[in-house]
């Protein structure tokens, strides 16, 4: 029979995959760029820690878990910075009318 740690790891991994797929599909919906910038945040703040938890429960503390945790921490810190940079670039290139997702009609 499977131990409870493996079951919890499988559930955490399943939830992480479901959130990643849902965020990816939602980002494809045609809305404004600022609304779509929220979905990568879900990947960094929800999916990453759940993946780290799944690896920790499956492999235990060690080098594998540390490398996964370090990667998740790096993505967590840089995710907000890259989202802000993309938003600022969009304002510079497209102008502030893009905030609502509506384009100027000529």
Image: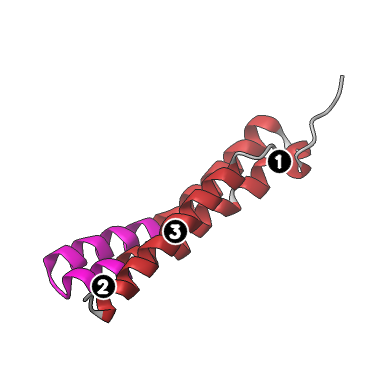
- Numbered disc in front, either 2 or 3: 2
Tell me the crowding category of disc 2: few under 14, some 14 to 19, or many 20 or more residues within 10 angstroms, Cα based: some
Vertical relation: 8 (above or below) 77: below
The residue at which mark 1 appears reads as: 31
Image point (87%, 19%), residue name: 106
Can residue 33 be seen in the rendering of this structure? Answer: yes
* Rendered location of residue 11, percent (x, y): 38, 68
Is residue 49 or residue 5 the one in the foreground?
5
- The answer to whether the residues at label 3 and label 1 have Cβ atoms under 8 Å apart is no
Q: Quadrant of the N terminus?
A: bottom left
Q: Is 101 positioned to the left or the right of 23 in the image? A: right
- Secondary structure at badge 1 equals loop
Magenta segment: 53-77
Is residue 45 or residue 91 the one in the foreground?
45
- Numbered disc in front, either 2 or 1: 2
Outermost residue on the left side: it is 63
Instruction: Name the image colouring.
Output: secondary structure
């Amino acid at each position: 029979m499977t131990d409870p740690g493996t079951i919890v790891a499988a559930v955490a991994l399943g939830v992480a995959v479901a959130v990643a797929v849902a965020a990816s599909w939602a980002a494809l919906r045609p809305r404004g760029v600022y609304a779509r910038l929220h979905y990568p945040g879900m990947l960094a703040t929800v999916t990453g820690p759940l993946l780290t938890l799944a690896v920790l429960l499956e492999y235990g503390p060690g080098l594998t878990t540390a490398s996964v945790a370090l990667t998740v921490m790096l993505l967590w810190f840089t995710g907000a910075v890259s989202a802000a940079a993309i938003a600022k670039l969009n304002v510079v290139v497209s102008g502030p009318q893009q905030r609502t997702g509506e384009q100027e009609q000529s």
